[in-house]
Image: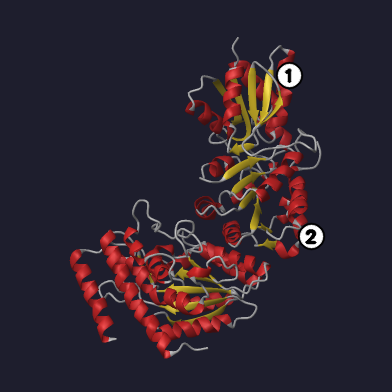
Amino acid sequence: MSMTIREAYAQALVRYGANDPRVVVLDADVSGSTRSVVFQNVAPDRFFNVGIAEANMTAMAAGFAAVGKIPFANAFGVFITSNGLLSATAFGSYAELPVKYVGAYGGLSDSFDGPSHHSIEDIAVMRALPNVKVFVASDSVNTDWLVKHAIDDPSPMYLRLSREAFPDLYSANESFECGKGKVLREGTDATIIACGLMCGHALVAAETLKRVGTSVRVVDMFTIKPIDRELILRCANETGLIVTAEEHNIIGGLGSAVAEVLCGEGQPSRVGFVGICDCHAECGPYAQLQEKYGLSSAAIAERVRKLIKK
Amino acid sequence: MAISIEKRRELEGLCRTFRRDVIRVLHERQTGHPGGSLSVCEILTALYFYAANIEANRAEDPNRDRIVLSKGHAAPMLYRILAEKGFFDPAEMHSLRTIDSRLQGHPCSHSTPGVDMTSGPLGIGLSAALGMALGLRCDGSDARVYAVLGDGELNEGTIWEACMSAAKFGADHLTAIVDWNGVQLDGTTEQVMPMGNLSAKFSAFGWRCIECDGHDIASLCGALDESRQSKGIPSVILARTVKGKGVSFMEGKNSWHGKPIGEEEFKQAMQELEAKAVCQ
């Protein structure tokens, strides 16, 4: 485990954005939390703190984009995808202005602040917007690439980050591609398709299952939209069972996206979903919340065991 | 610089043409918003033909001014004016709101040449205009950005978020123009949501506030000149207008916000608009 995802994001913003005059950064009075303050420290002329006004922030970001800038709009995931949504719909999605909506505290990572600050529907919301790409950061190396990609790709997109550190998945020179998931571990009996925090849990679950003779493949689907259709279909074909794992409501997120691919292609495969079961969590230590609300390696392993062909 | 008499007469003539053409196409299509299109006619005409340096043959110039029609439902008037500016053939107006048309129900920047910003959902155009203004300033451009707002739109809280931000960032190259017609969809602004003293409100938010007659070209152009003098703070022009201006039975009526125009109504409207053309 290295640095937190938010810190990796801020360092990448500086690495790729500090000397790029096209990059501007906006924040809604949470720059110390989102860590966008790190960018402010090196490029104050291209940093705009708009106060507690996410709706204004995302609309301003669209204005920057309309005159050739690459704006990163920062706030907690739950607020940028709610208060900030109107202009994401009109200007990001419809007008296709290349705004980068950055949700800092994804999932339950703002654990002690409770459900009002948890973000468990953001992927569903942003995934439903035409033209908007959706990525979930899975470790610090992946986060670094996401920021670079956000600058290079002239599309509106949502980057879901985390307050916390995730287990390291990749070495520093790993290469990524938009629309291409990463196979983290090979296996033949089942595939766990995970994103973000759940990738680490999926690897632990796969190790647990190995001990009882079940060979499980693990995929990091950090690219939720566009999703890797080819890889999903291949995993279904080769392993016959897919279990998705996400730090998000079971409705509308990664699991739904994977099921849409499988159903849409008429691909015969059993599918299981691990995530938050359409409820709001509560406040408490992050690890305990994950345990209680089914975001654990045990929950994933249990789901695989239940669904796998005897 | 004050507007010359010749120029003023030219713009007044354009306004008469625009009103007739917009009513004609709204009748033809049986959909669209007449009230707010008629009230914003002189405002948009003064912007596009007097204040803003926008020409179709230099649309790609990064240093040109920008105009955001935040009250996007007045799209028919915007389209007619963009056609006059040469962005497309005025005959294309007939395709308004039809399938495969470049002229969407509300302005769409990637469909319609000359539209600087997509709009439609009320309340977010001023923020977008502010972002454009600050982005241009980052590049050292002295281009101005104009945002045309409805007065009903001022109900939206985002407008006031944008006002705070524009003052904080000293956006003196941003001018908001309020089409202050006093009528919104469900009734008068006083009935639906009284906004109190608008001038005092904007001033309290740190804006330079200018009032003018929004149907008088000279008054509007003077206000736009004055807004360009603003140093260090953004400016707003509160332009007094009449919803449905120029068609007697539409004037001041919320029912004409977005109603199809009937045959008899069309005849009368055109008579009134033609008569004004003759006597003036």
Q: Quadrant of the C terminus of chain B?
A: bottom left
- In this picture the colour scheme is secondary structure
Which image quarter: residue B179?
A: bottom left
Is residue A133 found left or right of B80 in the rendered image? right
Q: Residue at x 58, y 34 (%)?
A: A254
Q: Residue at x 26, y 61 (%)?
A: B28
List x then y, in percent, for residue A156.
Answer: 58, 50
Residue B245 appears in view: no
Please tell me how crowded label 1 is: few (under 14), some (14-19), or many (20+) other residues with Cα within 10 Å: some
The residue to which callout 2 is attached is A42
List x then y, in percent, for residue A111.
Answer: 69, 41
The residue to which callout 1 is attached is A208
List x then y, in percent, for residue A183.
Answer: 69, 27
**For this rendering, which residue is in front, B109 or A294?**
B109
Which image quarter: residue A284?
A: top right
User: Which chain is disc 2 placed on?
Assistant: A
